[in-house]
Image (cartoon, rainbow, N blue to C red):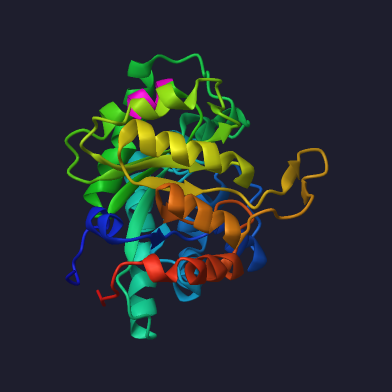
């Protein structure tokens, strides 16, 4: 492997470690993320905090940083009085902040190749009303494609290594995203949010994953922002149906109490699960909500023998 190995090539050679939850890092640093823009608000107000959050994960053992653009959309920024040109600048900035964190990690002695994934959240994330976990927005596939394409174009032009089409609750939205990434010249992964053996919108995972089987742009398929216990079936199904590397980054297993606005229960995310997912075909593994740097370090240690050969950028 050379120092400019693509992420797809790295996945063919071994297992790559994703980061954990961006909100974990930002909230622990004292930032209030209760705004509708969530972490995307800090692109304008505190970009250095985003760099530090990415850097913390790189230093913890992550190979890939997922940008803070999950909830960053032209429509969402417009509601805050941010015009189209400035919104495009902020979307592109999310990629540059990931790159800056990678540069600092390398300067600080992290001796492996690092990648930046530009996050593309679902339509429901822009609505900020919880519908990102339900899907079924009442929009057609064409309408969803028109929503996603403009910001995908901006993010792709910013030069990420991969587009992270993540937390997708509905196979119809996946169809729209698969159309929207065509011709952008940047590979992507497709990751559903699931409950049990179905998407959040209720479609069987076998049918949902099959949509990406013949999509040349998609280098990995899987799940994120779900309970760890929901991952086993998803990994097996995604690997069997698509023949592609599988991406998984579940939540910690704690539950969100909307009334109390607090997390309850305990983490069920374990390194034993991680090695099981790896054995079933997962090649891009990390964590989502409530999975922090310590868990990523443990994860990286658990799969260290299967990671690609390390090289500097």
Residue 175 covered by magenta stretch: yes
Q: Is residue 171 above or below residue 262?
A: above
Q: Quadrant of the C terminus?
A: bottom left
Q: Quadrant of the N terminus?
A: bottom left
Q: Is 206 displayed left or right of 10 in the figure? A: right
| Number of dots carrying numbers | 0
Q: Is 19 displayed left or right of 270 in the figure? A: left
Per the rendered image, the range of residues in magenta is 172-177
At horizontal 59% and vertical 31% (from top left) the residue drawn is: 133
Q: Is residue 95 visible?
A: yes
Residue located farthest toward the right when viewing the structure as drawn = 260
Q: Is residue 121 visible?
A: no
Residue 311 covered by magenta stretch: no
At horizontal 53% and vertical 65% (from top left) the residue drawn is: 299
Q: Position of residue 117 (x, y in %)?
A: 35, 54
Towards the viewer: 101 or 42 = 101
Towards the viewer: 266 or 156 = 266
Q: Position of residue 163 (x, y in %)?
A: 32, 46
Towards the viewer: 160 or 126 = 160
């Amino acid at each position: 492997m050379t120092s400019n190995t693509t992420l797809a090539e790295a996945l063919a050679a071994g297992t790559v470690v994703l980061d954990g939850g961006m909100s974990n890092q930002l909230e622990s640093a004292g930032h209030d993320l209760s705004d509708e823009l969530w972490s995307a608000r800090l692109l304008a107000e505190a970009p250095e905090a985003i760099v530090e959050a990415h850097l913390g994960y790189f230093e913890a053992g992550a190979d890939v940083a997922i940008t803070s653009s999950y909830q960053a959309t032209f429509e969402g920024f417009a509601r805050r009085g941010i015009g189209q040109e400035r919104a495009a600048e902020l979307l592109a900035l999310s990629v540059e902040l990931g790159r800056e964190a990678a540069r600092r990690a390398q300067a600080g002695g992290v001796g492996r190749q690092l990648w930046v994934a530009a996050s593309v959240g679902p339509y429901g994330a822009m609505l900020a009303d919880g519908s990102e976990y339900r899907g079924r927005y009442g929009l057609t596939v064409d309408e969803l494609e028109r929503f996603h394409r403009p910001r995908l174009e901006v993010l792709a032009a910013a030069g990420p290594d991969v587009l992270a089409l993540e937390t997708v609750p509905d196979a119809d939205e996946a169809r729209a995203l698969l159309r929207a990434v065509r011709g952008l010249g940047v590979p992507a992964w497709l990751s559903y949010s699931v409950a049990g053996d179905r998407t959040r919108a209720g479609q069987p995972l076998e049918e949902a994953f099959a949509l990406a089987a013949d999509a040349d742009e998609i280098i990995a398929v899987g799940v994120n922002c779900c309970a760890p216990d929901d991952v086993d079936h998803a990994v097996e199904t995604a690997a069997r149906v698509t023949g592609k590397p599988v991406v998984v980054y579940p939540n910690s297993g704690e539950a969100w109490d909307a009334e109390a606005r607090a997390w309850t229960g305990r983490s069920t995310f374990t390194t034993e699960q991680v090695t099981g997912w790896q054995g079933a075909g997962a090649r891009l593994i990390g964590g989502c909500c409530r999975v922090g740097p310590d868990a990523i370090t443990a994860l990286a240690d658990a799969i260290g023998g299967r990671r690609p050969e390390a090289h500097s950028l």
